[in-house]
Structures are given as C-alpha cells and as structure tokens.
Amino acid sequence: MESLISISNLNKSYGSKKVLSGVNLSLSAGQIVGLVGPNGAGKTTCLQSILGLTDFEGDISVLGHHPRKDRVNMLNDVAYISDVAILPKWLKVSQALSYMQDIHPNFDLEKAEEFLAKTNIAHNDKVKALSKGMVAQLHLALILAIDAKVLILDEPTLGLDILTRRQFYTHLLEDFYTEEKCIVVTTHQIEEIEHILTDVAFIQQGKIVLAQSTDDIKARFNLVAVTSEQIPQADELQPLFKNSMMGLTTMLFDNQDKETLQGLGKVSVPSLADVFVGVMNKETC
Amino acid sequence: MNTAIMKASIKKELWEFNGMLKWVPITLAGVFIFIPLLSVLLNGINMQAVLHEVGHIAEELERLTQMQQTDRLSEIFFVSAMALFTPFIAIGFIVQVYYFITCLFDERRDQSVMFWRSLPVSDGMTIASKLLTGAIVIPVIFFGAATLLMLLMLVLAFAVSVILSVGYDISLWSWFANAGIISGIGYIWLSLVPIAVWLLPLYSWLMLASVYANKAPFLWAVLPIVALLVIEAIVVHYLNISQPFFGHFIADYFSITPDHMAELAIEQEKSRSAALGILIAQIDYRTVLVSAGLLFGAYWFRVNKSEA
C-alpha cells in the first residue's frame, strides 16, 4: 500500500521536557488510525508535527511534502480538525464557505452546501449563535468538502453529546472516507470509534508502545474470565491487566496460546479500550 | 504572491472587524452632519446675518479671483478639506492601532489560529494581508468616509450657491471654478501611502506585540518602550552621556516639528504639497530597517510560537 504519512525517529522537547521520543509510524491509504494515549502522552504534539504547526527533530513526510518546509502545498491535500471550539465566533457560515472557496483549490462548495442542508445551520448564522454540536457539523462540512487525501482529527468530538458524536463519525465514513484516503484520529472515547478503526497506535510518555492493525490486535490479545480456583495458574502467565469485580476476575493476555487460556476460563476478544488499559498498565508497571 | 488569496485574506479581516470599520466612520460622519443641524434646530437661524456673512465671503472670494489669486483659493479649500479630514484620519489612526494590537492576538485567544493555520495560506501571506489591511485598507475606509462627507457638503454648497445666485444675486461660482477641489482632495489621498510607509515601524511593532503577547497585548506594546526609555534616561543621567539614543531616535522619527513644517512650507510655498513633502521627508533608511526587522519578528513568532 502507498504510504501517505511516514514518520521516522520523531523527537520533540519543550525545554528540558521530552514530549516525543523516537516516534516511528507509517500510514497508508485506506487506513483509519486511532492515535490513543492518556492526557499529556504527546498525541497533539505528534499531530501538530505532522501538520507542520510545530518544529521537531526527525523526518516526517506527508504526501511527499515536508510539513515545515512545504506546509502550504501539503495543506492542499491535508485537512485538520482540532476540536469543536476553534472556528472564530465572529465568522458567518456564508463567510466561511466563501473564504474556503477563495483560498482552497480542492474545496467543493456544492458538497459543503449539500452537507449543511441536512443540518439546522443557516447561511446567515454566526458561529457564536451555534451550539457546540452545530459548530462541529459546520467544521465537518468545511473539511468534508475538501477532497483531502489525509484527514487529521484531534479530539474532534470533545465536549459533544453522544448523539452528535455518533453522527459525526457516521458522516465521516459516509461522506469522506474512501480507500484512497487516510484518517488519523485521536480521542479519549476509543470505545466509540473502535468499530471504524483499521489500525491503532498507542502512545505513552511520547513513545509509541503499540502500533498494529485492529485485526492483528484482536488475534494477539485475549480477555479471559478466570474462575477463582484458576487465578494462581493464570497469574503465572503474566496477564497484562487484571480486574476483579463481584467475584469474577478478568485478565488480559498478550500472545498466549488460546487452548491454554481456554483452560483458565471463558476467552473473549477484548475491546480496544481493554487492550489500551492493559498495555498502559504494563508500561507503567 | 497569489492575489486571489490576498484578496480573500483582506476580505476576512474586514469581516472580522466589520462592526468597528463600518460604524466608527458612519458615526463620525453622523456627528459632522447632525451637530450643525442640531445647533440650527436649537438656536434657530438668523437668515439676515447668514446672508450678510456669505455675501462678505463671496466678495472676498471674488476679489481673490480678480487678483488672479487662484492658488490662494485652492489653499483655502485645501485647508478646509484638511479640517474635515483630520478627525477622520485621527480616529482612523486609533482604529488602526487597535487593529494592529489585536489582529494576531485575538485569533490565538479564541484558538481560531489553529483553524486558519490548517488551511493552505502561508504565514507570510497572513502577515502581509494583515499589514495591508491595517496600513492601507483601514485608512482608505476613513479617507473614503471623509471624502463622501466632503462631496455631500459640496453638493449642499452647490445647492446654496444656486439659491444665492438666483435669489440674492450673490455669486460663488468663481470659487467653485478656482478652488481646485479635485486636486485638493487628490493631494490628501496622495498622503495615504506616505503616511502608511512613515508609520510602518509603529505598525510592525504593534503586530509583533500582538503575535507575541499571551495576555494584554496593549501593555506588551507600550511597556517595553516605556521601560527602555526610562532605563536609558537613568543610564544617560548617571553616565553623563550627551543624549539618549532610543529616546532621540523615536522622538526624531515620529515628531513633525513646527520648525520643520515652516521650513518645508517656505520651501514649497504651498501647504498642500508641503504636507506631502513633510511626510515623505520623514521616511528614510530607518523606516526600512526597523520595519523589516520587526515584521520578520512577527512572521517568525507566527511560524514558531506554539499554540498548543
């Protein structure tokens, strides 16, 4: 597959504080990658480096462009949503559409208007008069109307209610995503988007601790509901994560033989949230 | 430089400051129109006294015309036009200062800078469009408002002249013919670019404060200069240096002294070309060097200052 974003040995420090440390990632067309990590893990800095919004050490290539040296040309094919609050309050919807059409070579006004027609947003509305959800919809309309090859979303649904969040990702899949495009998304609500992700990269303290396709992760990790008498045996297999609740203990195992695990209890496929908690737990132990 | 993107960027600036750029000149023009009207309504009008005064002015103007003193007539018009333009230029300058202080600060305060910087518009283009908006477009709006008011007054003057000519046999037509109305207004408009170039170091400094400050950009614009002048004054006082460098530099560059004006006016004999000459004389190598340095600083901070 064609690599759209290639990150090699990315490092970034703020003063003496190291924020990113030796990050390596390669993202290809067709991938929807979740960049997941706890607060302060370096997700936003990583995305800002990809977008050329901050300086960095290492090599990044986005669609063949250097994000710092060739930012404007790169942004013709890269779209970005930071969070719902960044559209200026004084901006009118009609002005946003007009400005995008004037400055963006790949902006499709009809597509944006088509999307907005499905919402309650009027052309004369100002951003300050819109609810958080409507601002997100407007921002999405502007971004979806760009025929971008790479879409970068940094906590795009932060502060939105669950209905708007689901609507947001539905539109993303239906109106934007194709096999030729790549989407990178960071979110805290990984359980809400895990069904749309093709790949996941877990980041902790500036380092990528796991980067794999969701299919491989599901094959690699197993969640076992261990009976109380099997706990000592299960402990010997060094679970990544152990949770006891109401007399039932669940354990997450990495790369363990499935038949052995079945002997300990009921084996199921863990959610990405389970794997995330397990991997983060392992890294901090 | 892509002119379509520049136009779109300037349009965006005008949208952002739409309220201020629309209502301040309209209010100012309204003051000029309604205060005289209000005065007439409250105090009444003594038609006899007005006619006497107008007749006297008409005679004086006629005398100047007969003496071939057309230059004097155009000077009178120019000075009157300047009197009308000056409040617009002064208020426009305050608006410009406000614009420059907030133009790069507000977008960081509301975090919309992340949206603007996610679009394919270079930082150089953004700085240039904001500079052009503040230094040229805003003065054009205020000059335009003053010109429209001037034209309105000229239309009124024309109507009054018709009435005086037909009803009272007082002729002001020779004044209209010799006042040099278009060239007078033209001279004022010509000063727009020299003013912008002369004040470029100030505008650049305000933009630098706007892009650098995380809070209170006005204080960032004022306090460093004040601190520098105070420290320099102390150093000069204790080291017995002949004169402060920065203090002298700033005072010399931005002050147009009466001596300077008189010198140029005598040289050029006409106040309208003298005004233009004074402005152009203020522009020198310092304008280019200081502005270039400060603008590069504003650009550098725009590119490198992290907004995360």
Image (cartoon, rainbow, N blue to C red):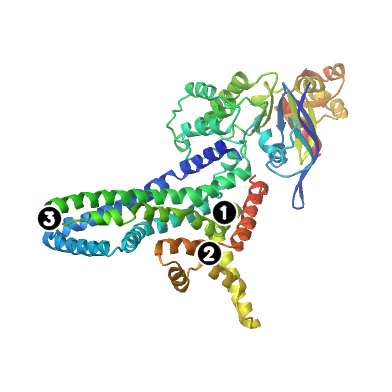
Determine if residue B216 is in view.
no
State the image coordinates of residue A284 (x, y, percent, origin top left).
79, 39
Between A76 and A184, the residue placed more toward the observer is A76
Residue that carries the numbered disc 1 in the rendered image: B207
State the image coordinates of residue B223 (x, y, percent, origin top left).
56, 65
| Among numbered discs 1 and 2, the one appearing first in the sequence | 1
What amino acid type should be assigned to the residue bearing mark 1?
Met
Classify B277 as above or below A193. Answer: below
Between A253 and A72, the residue placed more toward the observer is A72
Residue that carries the numbered disc 3 in the rendered image: B168
Q: Which of marks 1 and 2 is in front?
A: 2
Give the spatial CA distance, label 1 vs label 2.
Answer: 21 Å
The quarter holding residue A168 reads top right
What amino acid type should be assigned to the residue bearing mark 2?
Gln
What amino acid type should be assigned to the residue bearing mark 3?
Tyr
| Among numbered discs 1 and 3, the one appearing first in the sequence | 3
Between A285 and B9, the residue placed more toward the observer is B9
| Same-subunit check for callouts 2 and 3 | yes
State the image coordinates of residue B196 (x, y, percent, origin top left).
51, 55
